[in-house]
Image (tube, rainbow, N blue to C red):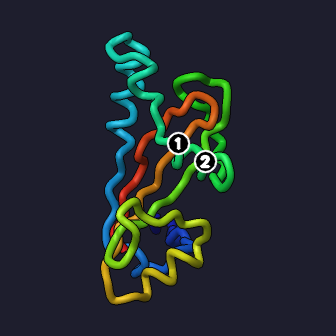
Amino acid sequence: MPRKQTQKKQSNEPEDLYLGEIDHRLTRRAVINNFRGGTISQESICDAHPELLRVARNFGRPTRAKCPICVNDQLVTVTYLFGPRLPRHGKFIATRDEIEQFARRPEQFTAYLVEVCRSCSWHHLLKTRNI
């Protein structure tokens, strides 16, 4: 019996846009488990910087996930870019077009995708990408 041919999943991202990616979900899961187990306090993990909260409230991209800490609010994601000729605190990236503009430049940049709860100030780095 012949094998069924599967089609490659189509992506909206050009293959050469990202040079590498690190997923931080295992660390996220460990922090959440430690919180639920009573090893760490909510105050120690719900301490997002005021600027991160401002960006999350005004520009965060909504997700379907509820906050794993307070379960009162939906999480949003925020992307920051770091690299040559950018401010020391990084640059907030609002659109996909902005990332593509930086990807066309000869310098290498690092993008950080952060999830944020606007209610309790939980935040966690989800992915690090080199572009």
Q: Mark 1 is on which residue type?
A: Pro
Q: Secondary structure at mark 2?
A: helix
Q: Mark 2 is on which residue type?
A: Arg
- 110 is higher (above) or lower (below) than 68: below
Q: Residue furthest top?
A: 38
List x then y, in percent, for residue 20.
31, 68
Residue placed at 33% from the left, 72% from the top? 83
- 40 is higher (above) or lower (below) than 7: above
* CB under 8 Å between discs 2 and 1: yes
Q: Secondary structure at mark 1?
A: helix
Residue placed at 67% from the left, 31% from the top? 73
Mark sitting on residue 83 = none
List x then y, in percent, for residue 14.
49, 80
Examine the image and state in which quarter residue 110 appears.
bottom left
Residue placed at 41% from the left, 58% from the top? 112
- 128 is higher (above) or lower (below) than 24: below
Q: CA distance from mark 2 to mark 1?
A: 6 Å
Mark sitting on residue 50 = 1
Which residue position is annotated with label 2? 54
List x then y, in percent, for residue 15.
43, 78
